[in-house]
Amino acid sequence: MFSSDKLNEISNKIKAVVKDSPLGDAEKNIHALLKSVFTKMDLVTREEFDVQADVLRSTREKLNALEKQLVEISKKQS
């Protein structure tokens, strides 16, 4: 997956190549095209990924605690 830093790096390389050519006006279009492509790929930022990973970790901990409680309740009823 591409991070925003990687996108900026690619964009800067394209800018450097296009800067001295007649395609200078196309720079904005290329940048917009790249952004559009990456948006359509449904990529998430590292920050968003980390937040969701924390939510998942917390949910797993709660599930494990509930499973232990269920086992204890089952033992008491037996």
Image (cartoon, helix red, strand yellow):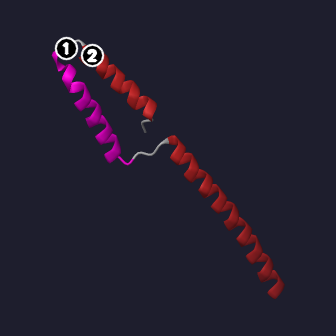
Toward the right, the furthest residue is 76
Q: Residues within 10 Å of mark 2 (few under 14, many from 20)?
A: few
In the rendered image, which quarter is residue 34 located in?
top left
Pinpoint residue 67: horizontal percent, then vertical percent. Answer: 71, 71
Q: How many marks?
A: 2
Would residue 78 be seen by someone viewing this image from the given angle? no
Marks 1/2: CA distance?
7 Å
72 or 35, which is in the foreground? 35
Rendered-image quadrant of the C terminus: bottom right
Residue at the disc numbered 2? 17
The location of residue 12, given as percent across then percent down, is: 35, 22
Which class describes the residues within 10 Å of circle 1: few (<14), some (14-19), or many (20+)?
Answer: few
**Residue lying at 42% horizontally and 30% vertically, measured from the top left:** 6
Instruction: List the single residue furthest toward the bottom.
Output: 77
The residue at the point 57 percent across, 46 percent down is: 50
Q: Amino acid at mark 2?
A: Val
44 or 19: nearer the eye?
Answer: 19
Q: Which residue is disc 1 drawn over?
A: 21
Q: Quadrant of residue 31?
A: top left
Point 78% across, 81% down: residue: 73
Q: Amino acid at mark 1?
A: Ser
In the depicted structure, whether residue 56 falls above or below residue 40: below
Mark 1 in CB contact with mark 2 (< 8 angstroms):
yes
| Residue 77 coordinates in the image, percent (x, y) | 80, 87
Above/below status of 50 relative to 76: above
> From which residue to which does the magenta span run?
21-42
